[in-house]
Image: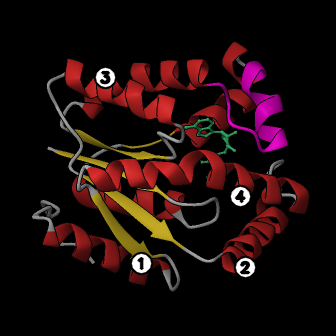
């Protein structure tokens, strides 16, 4: 049973690390950003509602976001554990996740905070813009996403720190180096992948 959250600014490498960690622990990586992008691409009703917010670098309203996470956590593969990437991002979402976990008689093990300085994350996001053409990776929207993160999501670090759940990891360096740092930090908390990992 491993229940993890990844928090960090846009461009810190959450998505990349989420994939690595989920594989190591044998749990699903659940990314609200990926779920929204999938729905936007397929023009579902959810995607049509989320698109304008995402393109502007705003958060999708909590009501929509909480509903998709509630559905996703009820799927069978999330029963033995999960890694949430990019959720919760607001205090309202924290309250909703608390409610969901309480209802299932479970709790979070660790919140992994990936830190990276602003210059680095901006340059990573601009590089991703050139490679992948994500609609929200333009310079203006990136600046706005970072501001929204500082205002709405950074305060969550204090909330989870007060619960003694946060481990902080430097997001600078090669992917495998950062994964190694996270695995070390988790091991210090007694969380080890079932199989030997990099
Ligand atoms: P990043 O972390 O680089 O901003 P994500 O793929 O995690 O990228 O998210 C992309 C966009 O999806 C966000 O800017 C936001 O519009 C929407 N989104 C993702 N997760 C959430 C969330 N928990 N609450 C509200 N909006 C979200």
**In the figure, residue 190 lies in which quadrant?**
bottom left
Q: Is residue 111 visible?
A: yes
Q: Nearer the viewer, mark 4 or mark 1?
A: 4
Q: CA distance from mark 4 to mark 1?
A: 21 Å
Mark 1 close to ligand 1, CB under 8 Å: no
Give x and y (percent) for residue 28: 34, 43
Q: Which residues are magenta?
A: 48-61
Q: Which mark is residue 178?
A: 1
Q: Quadrant of ligand 1?
A: top right
Mark 4 in CB contact with mark 2 (< 8 angstroms): no
Q: Which mark is residue 119?
A: 2
Say which label, 4 or 2, has the lower sequence index.
2
Q: Are there few (<14), some (14-19), or many (20+) residues within 10 Å of tag 1? A: some
Q: Is residue 75 visible?
A: no
- Answer left or right for 141 relative to 102: right
Say which label, 4 or 3, has the lower sequence index.
3
């Amino acid at each position: 049973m491993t229940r993890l959250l990844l928090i960090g600014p846009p461009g810190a490498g959450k998505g990349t690390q989420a994939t690595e960690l989920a594989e190591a622990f044998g749990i699903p990586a659940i990314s609200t950003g990926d779920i929204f992008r999938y729905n936007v691409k397929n023009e579902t009703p959810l995607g049509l509602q989320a698109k304008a917010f995402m393109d502007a670098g705003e958060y999708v309203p909590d009501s929509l976001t909480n509903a998709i996470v509630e559905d996703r956590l009820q799927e069978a593969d999330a029963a033995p554990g999960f890694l949430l990437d990019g959720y919760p991002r607001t205090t309202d979402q924290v309250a909703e996740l608390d409610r969901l976990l309480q209802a299932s008689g479970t709790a979070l093990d660790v919140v992994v905070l990936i830190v990276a300085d602003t210059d680095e994350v901006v340059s990573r996001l601009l590089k991703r813009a050139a490679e992948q053409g994500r609609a929200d990776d333009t310079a203006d929207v990136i600046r706005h996403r970072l501001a929204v993160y500082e205002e709405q999501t950074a305060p969550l670090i204090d909330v989870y720190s007060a619960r003694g759940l946060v481990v902080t990891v430097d997001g600078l360096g090669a992917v495998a180096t950062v994964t190694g740092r996270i695995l070390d930090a988790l091991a210090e908390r007694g969380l080890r992948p079932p199989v030997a990992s990099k």
